């Protein structure tokens, strides 16, 4: 060891002659991260589908006569927005009076109490988080099934708070029927792409809504304007930019988590989905039997009518 190293007290550094660059821990971590984020064939198809969704949504958004195709999904995203306000309100001890959706793609959550610092940004951030979670689940069929069960719970809670709002009933009943229909198509593969579409739609709507309401133009009744009044330190545009960045992060995070978490091929997913909440009436080859016992139909109708009576009571 040189004399100046001894004076400074530096420990002598010796290279391990048996350690190669390929066995270096930093290299191993980087290699594992690259392998985890590199999409397989099934994931590439999912990413292509998501890219097509983005283009199609962008086109339909601005074409007057065919924009009605994505209109129900816009309202669904508004429902995610309002429900996020309500859920955070409940968590902060607020009393939720009602949730309302209107045909002009607007909505309102009426509550008293709670913590406005948390309930106001919850609308945009909550709906973008829901969208990101749906995008993640859109990479796997079984995960998409779990996501639709969570959506069913979301629909029921929303109907409880919006039971006097007819457009909410039409929207949720229509979406529920669409989900059930897609569950039965191609052993729920169609359901996976529907969940992916809803996730992409939700994230895009949040990004567009934030830009439209807070950055390109100032809407006095927007969440960002109300939040700016409470804070008093920054204008609504600043909060809009911050929420926009967070929404972008959720969007990207949903894709990255999907790439890392669901590496199963299409064949593996097909095998897995045949053992997890399989489509009733399917045989081992995946063929669907169209016969449904009358007793099951009566039970389903009775349960649906009971739910309607409870919600309208």
Image: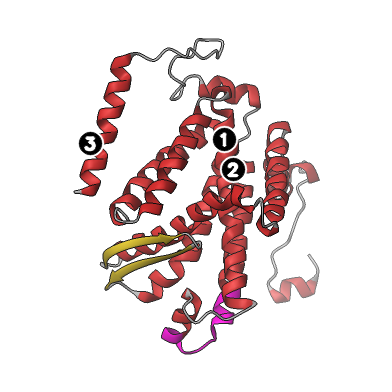
Q: Which residue is drawn at 58% across and 56% down?
A: 203
Which badge, 3 or 2, comes first in the chain's sequence?
A: 2
Q: Residue furthest left?
A: 313
Residue 279 percent coordinates (x, y): 46, 21
Mark 2, secondary structure of its residue: helix
> 112 or 177, which is in the foreground?
177
Q: Report the Cα–Cα distance between label 3 and label 2.
A: 31 Å
Residue 243 percent coordinates (x, y): 56, 70
Where 151 falls versus 276 (above or below)?
below
Q: Report the Cα–Cα distance between label 2 and label 1.
A: 6 Å
Per the image, the residue denoted by label 2 is 196
Q: Report the Cα–Cα distance between label 3 and label 1.
A: 30 Å
Where 227 falls versus 273 (above or below)?
below
Which badge, 3 or 1, comes first in the chain's sequence?
A: 1
Per the image, the residue denoted by label 3 is 306
Where 83 falls versus 155 (above or below)?
below
Q: Does the magenta stretch include residue 96?
A: no
Mark 1, secondary structure of its residue: helix
Q: Which region of the structure is painted magenta? A: 229-241
Helix, strand or loop: magenta stretch? helix
Q: Residue at x 42, y 72 (%)?
A: 120
Q: For mark 1, does the 10 Å Cα neighbourhood hold few (<14), some (14 to 19), or many (20 or more) residues? A: many
Per the image, the residue denoted by label 1 is 192
Q: Residue furthest top?
A: 284
Q: Nearer the viewer, mark 3 or mark 2?
A: 3
Q: For mark 3, does the 10 Å Cα neighbourhood hold few (<14), some (14 to 19), or many (20 or more) residues? A: few
- Is 176 on the left or on the right of 162, as rendered? right
Residue 50 percent coordinates (x, y): 67, 45
Q: In which quarter of the image is the N terminus?
A: bottom right
Q: Residue at x 39, y 71 (%)?
A: 118
Q: For mark 2, does the 10 Å Cα neighbourhood hold few (<14), some (14 to 19), or many (20 or more) residues? A: many
């Amino acid at each position: 060891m040189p004399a100046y190293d001894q004076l400074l007290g530096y420990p002598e550094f010796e290279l391990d002659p048996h350690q190669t660059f390929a066995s270096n821990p930093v290299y191993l971590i980087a290699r594992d991260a690259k392998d985890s984020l590199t999409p397989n064939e099934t994931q590439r198809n999912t990413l292509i589908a998501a890219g097509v969704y983005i283009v199609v949504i962008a086109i339909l958004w601005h074409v007057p006569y065919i924009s009605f195709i994505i209109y129900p999904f816009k309202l669904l995203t508004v429902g995610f927005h309002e429900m996020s306000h309500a859920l955070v309100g409940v968590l902060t001890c607020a009393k939720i009076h009602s949730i309302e959706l209107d045909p002009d793609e607007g909505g309102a959550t009426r509550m008293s109490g709670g913590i406005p610092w948390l309930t106001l940004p919850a609308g945009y951030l909550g709906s973008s988080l829901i969208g990101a979670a749906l995008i993640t689940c859109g990479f796997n069929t079984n995960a998409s099934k779990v996501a639709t069960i969570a959506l069913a719970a979301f629909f029921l809670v929303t109907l409880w708070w919006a039971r006097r709002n007819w457009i909410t009933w039409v929207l949720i009943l229509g979406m529920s029927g669409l989900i059930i229909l897609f569950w039965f198509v191609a052993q729920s593969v169609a359901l996976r792409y529907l969940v992916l579409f809803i996730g992409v739609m939700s994230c895009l709507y949040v990004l567009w809504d934030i830009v439209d309401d807070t950055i390109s133009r100032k809407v006095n009744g927007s969440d960002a304007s109300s939040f700016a009044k409470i804070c008093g330190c920054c204008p609504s545009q600043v909060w809009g930019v911050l929420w926009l960045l967070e929404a972008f992060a959720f969007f990207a995070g949903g894709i990255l988590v999907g790439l890392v978490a669901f590496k199963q091929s299409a064949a593996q997913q097909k095998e897995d989905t045949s053992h997890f909440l399989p489509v009733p009436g399917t045989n081992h080859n995946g063929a669907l039997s169209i016969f449904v016992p009358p007793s099951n139909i009566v039970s389903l109708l009775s349960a649906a009518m009971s739910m309607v009576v409870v919600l309208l009571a």
